[in-house]
C-alpha cells in the first residue's frame, strides 16, 4: 500500500504552506487545495476504519466565500461535524511533506489502533464551484490508494450530504433516518411539510435568493415534492444561475444580506413581501422584508430561533408535555441582547451560550429535549432527544387539541434536519410557523426590537495573544484589556461589547451593541481602537 500512497501523493504535491483544519474545515483559494483534499481523503478512510467501517462524508465547498475559493470538510457517521481530535490528525496529515505522507498515514493508523483490514467507506459531494470536479479527482486518488469504497453524490447542498451520511449509517436499523438518496431527502421533507402545514395556507409568496449556488437547483427539485403552491405555499426562486460561476455569492446570498444589512441590489420585492437568502452551500438562511415606514428589516438567526422556540414551546404545552420535556435555546455572543432577553423573559425559555462555531452550539443543544440553536448569521437547527421523540410518538391524546399538537410535533421532527443547519429545511420550518400563526413578516418582526449593533474586523500583528473565556464574551489575555472594555461598556445604555480572534480569518472581531445606533457605533469604534492599540503593544 505504501508505494501506492506515495505514488498518488506525488501526483498531489504539497505547496510550501501551512494548513489548518478550522471551524469550517480547510478553506482557501481553490488552486492551493489539491494536496489538502487528497490528504483529507486519506483521513476519511482512516476515520471510517477506526469506526468499524461506518461511512464518513466529505463535502467540497467554500460556502459563502467568493467563487475562486474552495474548501473541504469531513462529516461523522451520524451527520455531525468531525470529532475535534480528528481535526488535529487532519491538520497533521495536511502538513506532511509530500514524500512523508505514507509514513504519517501509518503512524496515525498505528497510534489510533486502526486495523487496515477493516473496510473504509466514504461518500462525497460538492457545490457548484468550477474547481470542484478537479478536487474530486484528488479525493478519489486518495480513496483508491488506500482501498476505500466510495460513492459520488455529485452536486449537493452541504446539509444534503450530512443527511445522506446519517441515512447510510442507519439504513435498515430502528434509527433509520430516511431513504439513502437525494430523492429520499426531498420525499422526506415534502411529506413532513404537508403534514406540518395541515392545510394551512401561507400569507403570500416567499422570494428565495439562492446566492447563485447549489441551493437553486436543489430547491427547484424540492418544489416537485411539495404540495401545489395553490394549496400551501408559493415559492419564487431568484438568483439561481449556477452556470455563470463568477456570480456565485456576488451581491446576493445570506452573508451579503446579513453583513451589509440590506437586500441584494437585484431584489424586486415589494413592500412587506417575505424574502429570504441562502448561502452558497445552502446551510444558512436569513429572512428580511421591506417595511414601508422603517425600510429594510432583517429577520436573522436569532429571530428564527425565537420564532421556533416559541412555536414548539406552545405545542409542547398543548401536548401536555411541558413538565416532562426541557426546551432550551443555544446562542453565541453575537446574538442580539434583545433576542436573549425576549427568549428568557417573555418566552421563559432558558438560554445557554457557547463559543462561535456550529459544533459547539449543536453539542450544547443535545443537552435539552428540544434544543434550538442558531448563530445570528442564520446557521442552525433544532435537535430532539430520544425522550422527546418517544413522548411525541407514544402519548395518548385526551383531546382534539392535544392530538393536533402531537401530530404537528411529529411532523416537525421529520421536517427539521437534525444533523446540521439546513437552509431548505429551515425555510420550510419558518413558513410552517408563519402559516400556523397567520403572520406576515411584520408581526414576526414586532416580537421584539433589536438593539443597534456593529461588527468590526480589526487587524492585529498576532491575534493569538487575545485569549477568551466565558463563551468568548470576555478576554482573559492580554491582561487588563477586559477591564478597559468593561469600563467602556459601562458608559453606554444597554452597552455590550466583546473582542475575539476569528477562527476563520487572520483578524480580531469586535462586536458592540447599545441603545442607539450612534452609541453602538461609538462603542464599537472605542473597543476596536483599544484592541488595535493593545495588539500592537504586545507584538
Ligand atoms: C461572526 C461570525 O459570523 N462568525 C462566523 C465565522 O467564524 P469566525 O470564527 O468569527 O471567523 O465563520 C464560522 C464558520 O462558518 C461561523 O460559524 C461563524 O458564525
Ligand atoms: Mg454555508
Image (cartoon, rainbow, N blue to C red):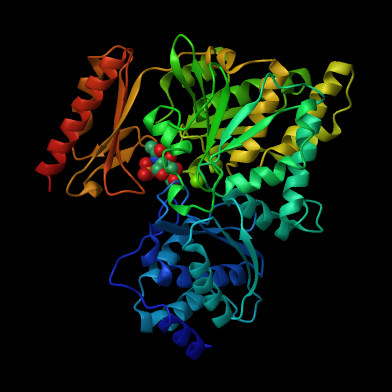
Picture quarter containing residue 30?
bottom left
Compared to residue 331, the image places residue 138 above or below, namely below
Q: Is residue 487 left or right of residue 382?
A: left
Count all numbered tags in the image, as a single digit: 0
Residue at 51% in and 35% down: 378
Position in image of residue 1 (x %, y %): 53, 88
Give whichever of 329, 269 is nearer the camera: 269
Compared to residue 333, the image places residue 535 above or below, namely below
Position in image of residue 243 (x %, y %): 53, 54
State whether residue 152 appears in this view.
yes
Q: Is residue 122 left or right of residue 222?
A: left
Q: Residue furthest left?
A: 537
Compared to residue 432, the image places residue 294 above or below, namely above
Q: Is residue 164 left or right of residue 509?
A: right
Q: Quadrant of ligand 1?
A: top left
Residue at 49% in and 73% down: 138
Residue at 33% in and 12% down: 515
Q: Is residue 174 left or right of residue 461?
A: right
Residue at 62% in and 26% down: 308
Position in image of residue 206 (x %, y %): 62, 27
Picture quarter containing residue 536?
top left
Give whichever of 118, 23 is nearer the camera: 23
Position in image of residue 216 (x %, y %): 59, 45
State whether residue 112 appears in this view.
no
Q: Residue furthest top?
A: 293
Compared to residue 487, the image places residue 61 above or below, namely below
Amino acid at each position: 500500500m505504501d508505494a501506492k500512497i506515495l505514488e498518488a501523493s506525488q501526483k498531489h504535491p504539497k505547496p510550501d504552506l501551512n494548513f489548518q483544519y478550522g471551524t469550517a474545515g480547510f478553506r482557501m483559494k481553490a488552486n492551493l487545495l489539491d494536496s489538502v483534499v487528497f490528504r483529507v481523503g486519506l483521513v476519511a478512510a482512516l476515520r471510517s476504519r477506526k469506526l468499524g467501517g461506518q461511512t464518513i462524508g466529505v463535502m467540497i465547498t467554500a460556502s459563502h466565500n467568493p467563487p475562486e475559493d474552495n474548501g473541504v470538510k469531513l462529516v461523522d457517521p451520524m451527520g455531525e461535524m468531525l470529532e475535534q481530535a480528528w481535526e488535529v490528525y487532519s491538520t497533521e496529515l495536511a502538513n506532511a511533506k509530500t514524500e512523508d505522507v505514507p509514513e504519517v498515514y501509518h503512524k496515525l493508523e498505528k497510534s489510533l489502533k486502526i486495523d487496515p483490514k477493516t473496510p473504509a467507506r466514504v461518500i462525497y459531494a460538492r457545490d457548484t464551484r468550477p474547481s470542484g470536479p478537479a478536487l474530486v479527482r484528488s479525493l478519489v486518488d486518495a480513496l483508491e490508494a488506500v482501498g476505500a469504497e466510495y460513492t459520488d453524490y455529485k452536486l449537493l447542498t452541504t446539509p444534503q450530504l450530512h443527511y445522506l451520511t446519517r441515512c447510510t449509517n442507519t439504513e435498515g436499523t430502528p434509527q433509520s433516518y430516511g431513504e439513502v438518496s437525494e430523492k429520499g431527502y426531498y420525499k422526506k421533507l415534502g411529506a413532513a411539510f404537508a403534514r406540518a402545514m395541515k392545510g394551512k395556507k401561507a400569507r403570500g409568496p416567499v422570494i428565495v435568493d439562492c446566492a447563485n449556488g447549489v441551493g437553486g437547483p436543489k430547491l427547484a427539485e424540492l418544489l416537485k415534492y411539495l404540495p401545489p403552491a395553490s394549496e400551501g405555499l408559493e415559492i419564487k426562486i431568484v438568483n439561481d444561475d449556477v452556470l455563470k460561476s463568477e456570480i456565485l455569492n456576488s451581491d446576493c446570498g445570506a452573508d451579503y444580506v446579513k453583513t451589509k444589512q440590506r437586500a441584494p441590489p437585484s431584489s424586486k420585492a415589494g413592500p412587506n413581501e417575505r424574502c429570504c437568502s441562502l448561502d452558497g452551500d445552502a446551510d444558512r438562511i436569513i429572512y428580511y422584508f421591506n417595511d414601508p415606514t422603517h425600510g429594510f428589516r432583517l429577520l436573522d438567526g436569532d429571530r428564527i430561533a425565537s420564532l421556533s422556540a416559541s412555536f414548539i414551546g406552545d405545542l409542547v404545552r398543548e401536548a401536555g408535555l411541558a413538565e416532562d420535556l426541557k426546551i432550551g435555546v443555544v446562542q453565541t455572543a453575537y446574538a442580539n441582547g434583545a433576542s436573549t432577553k425576549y427568549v428568557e423573559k417573555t418566552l421563559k425559555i432558558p438560554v445557554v451560550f457557547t463559543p462561535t462555531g456550529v459544533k459547539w452550539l449543536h453539542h450544547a443543544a443535545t443537552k435539552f429535549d428540544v434544543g434550538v440553536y442558531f448563530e445570528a448569521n442564520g446557521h442552525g437547527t433544532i435537535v430532539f432527544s430520544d425522550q422527546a421523540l418517544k413522548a411525541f410518538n407514544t402519548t395518548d391524546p385526551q383531546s382534539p387539541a392535544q392530538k393536533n399538537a402531537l401530530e404537528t410535533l411529529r411532523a416537525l421532527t421529520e421536517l427539521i434536519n437534525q444533523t446540521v443547519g439546513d437552509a431548505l429545511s429551515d425555510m420550510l420550518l419558518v413558513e410552517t410557523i408563519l402559516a400556523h400563526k397567520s403572520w406576515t413578516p411584520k408581526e414576526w418582526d414586532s416580537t421584539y426590537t433589536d438593539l443597534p449593533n456593529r461588527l468590526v474586523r480589526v487587524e492585529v500583528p498576532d491575534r493569538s495573544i487575545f485569549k477568551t473565556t466565558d463563551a468568548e464574551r470576555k478576554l482573559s489575555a492580554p491582561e487588563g484589556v477586559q477591564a478597559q472594555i468593561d469600563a467602556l461598556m459601562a458608559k453606554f445604555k444597554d452597552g455590550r461589547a466583546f473582542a475575539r480572534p476569528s477562527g476563520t480569518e487572520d483578524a480580531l472581531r469586535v462586536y458592540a451593541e447599545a441603545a442607539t445606533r450612534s452609541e453602538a457605533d461609538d462603542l464599537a469604534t472605542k473597543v476596536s481602537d483599544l484592541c488595535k492599540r493593545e495588539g500592537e503593544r504586545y507584538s
